[in-house]
């Protein structure tokens, strides 16, 4: 039996290009048209060189977007003098993400990963959050040539984000080392503009501000005369006096003054520390890091006798509070039966041999 083999003529296949953005293996950022592109710029400090850097970032992104066919400018978002380790205070960054989530942006362009964020978690969370939109929103990191809508890009992005975060950690360690070196040499890092009673002199020396110093002396004198912090605050407010931040006085603000060794001329350094370089949250140093103390560092506003007496009064007050708290705690531990018996004892009349009912 003879069989004939018939050749199959291949059919002509037409390619229908994708019209909707999706996460796939690259190319779509260059191929897509009518993309609304937003730019994000950031500098971490407010000095002049950084301001120039921010201007250059804006110029670069504007030129990049306007120079691409099919790209349309959707706005420039810029945060100045803000760290990239946290997005909490980056107003423009959060506004940009909100606009992207609201469907007003198709792609975000930024100079590099470190300009976008120095926190790996923040970077990846934003990338994945935007990728889940319908249609997804992409981020293009120009320096690293990474498109987040490229399925192959996330591994590279994760590695580079981790490197950017570690660079920030290293910078934080260097700053901490510089501070501690200054502390060891008796050089405090204090902004005297935020210090009631003192101004900074021509050479950085501490100069007493006479008007503010009177407030400091008033607080110590009235406290040693037996007035409460709340009463002192009320008197200061009645006199129209303000704190160094131009706020009304509170008992808490009064206690801050009473506990501040700088008013006697001493200077304690590294009373607070930053445990997490990502959050930059400052906490009280409870022994996690060394502290440095310089006696007679500058001219005091109050005498040493006034300072010592004030601290004794404060310690006695704190001790009374601890004792009262202990008594309250012991009272709370008394059983319900004991409390009931105590109530009955109070209502029992030994003369009449009766229990009064309420």
Image (tube, grey):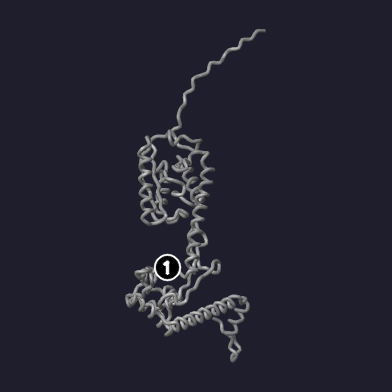
Position of residue 2 measured from the top left corner of the image (x, y, whole percent): 65, 7
Judge from the rendering whether residue 111 lies leftward or rightward of residue 354; answer left or right: left
Q: Secondary structure at mark 1?
A: loop
Which of 250/258 is in front? Answer: 258
Position of residue 115 measured from the top left corner of the image (x, y, whole percent): 44, 49
Judge from the rendering whether residue 74 lies leftward or rightward of residue 293; answer left or right: left
Which of 353/172 is in front? Answer: 172
Quadrant location of residue 234?
A: bottom left
Residue occupying the point 42% across, 82% down: 303
Looking at the rendered structure, the number of numbered marks drawn on it comes to 1
Position of residue 329 measured from the top left corner of the image (x, y, whole percent): 57, 76
Q: Residue furthest bottom?
A: 351
Mark 1 lies on residue: 190
Callout 1 crowding tier (Cα within 10 Å): few <14, some 14–19, many ≥20: few
Residue occupying the point 49% across, 82% down: 312
Q: Residue furthest right?
A: 1
Rendered view: 266 above or below 123: below
Which of 225/115 is in front? Answer: 115
Rendered view: 330 above or below 290: below
Position of residue 181 measured from the top left corner of the image (x, y, whole percent): 49, 65
Q: Residue furthest top?
A: 1
Rendered view: 206 above or below 79: below
- In which quadrant will I find the C terminus? bottom right
- In which quadrant will I find the N terminus? top right
Residue occupying the point 53% across, 39% down: 152
């Amino acid at each position: 039996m003879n069989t004939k083999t018939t050749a199959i003529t291949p059919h002509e296949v037409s390619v229908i290009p994708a019209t909707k953005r999706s996460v796939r293996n690259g190319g779509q950022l260059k191929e897509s048209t009518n993309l609304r592109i937003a730019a994000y710029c950031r500098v971490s400090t407010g000095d002049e060189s950084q301001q120039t850097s921010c201007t250059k970032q804006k110029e670069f992104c504007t030129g990049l977007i306007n120079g691409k066919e099919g790209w349309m400018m959707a706005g420039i978002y810029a945060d100045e003098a803000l760290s990239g380790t946290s997005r909490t205070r980056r107003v423009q960054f959060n506004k940009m993400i909100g606009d992207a989530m609201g469907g007003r942006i198709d792609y975000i362009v930024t100079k590099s990963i470190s300009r976008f964020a120095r926190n790996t978690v923040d970077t990846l969370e934003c990338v994945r959050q935007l990728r889940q939109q319908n249609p997804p929103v992409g981020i293009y990191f120009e320096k690293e040539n990474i498109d987040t809508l490229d399925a192959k890009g996330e591994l590279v992005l994760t590695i580079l984000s981790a490197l950017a975060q570690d660079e920030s950690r290293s910078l934080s360690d260097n700053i901490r080392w510089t501070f501690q070196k200054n502390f060891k040499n008796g050089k405090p890092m204090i902004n005297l503009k935020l210090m009631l009673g003192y101004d900074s002199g021509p050479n950085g020396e501490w100069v007493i501000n006479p008007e503010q110093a009177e407030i400091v002396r008033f607080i110590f004198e009235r406290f040693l005369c037996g007035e409460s912090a709340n009463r002192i605050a009320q008197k200061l407010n009645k006199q129209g006096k303000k704190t160094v931040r131009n706020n009304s006085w509170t008992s808490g603000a009064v206690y801050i003054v009473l506990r501040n060794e700088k008013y006697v001329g001493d200077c304690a350094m590294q009373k607070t520390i930053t445990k997490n370089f990502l959050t930059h949250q400052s906490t009280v140093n409870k022994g996690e890091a060394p502290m440095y103390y310089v006696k007679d560092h500058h001219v005091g506003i109050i005498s040493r006798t006034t300072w010592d007496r004030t601290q004794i009064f404060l310690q006695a007050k704190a001790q009374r509070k601890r004792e009262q708290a202990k008594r309250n705690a012991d009272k709370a531990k008394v059983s319900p039966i004991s409390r009931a018996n105590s109530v009955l004892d109070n209502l029992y009349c030994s003369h009449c041999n009766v229990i009064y009912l309420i």
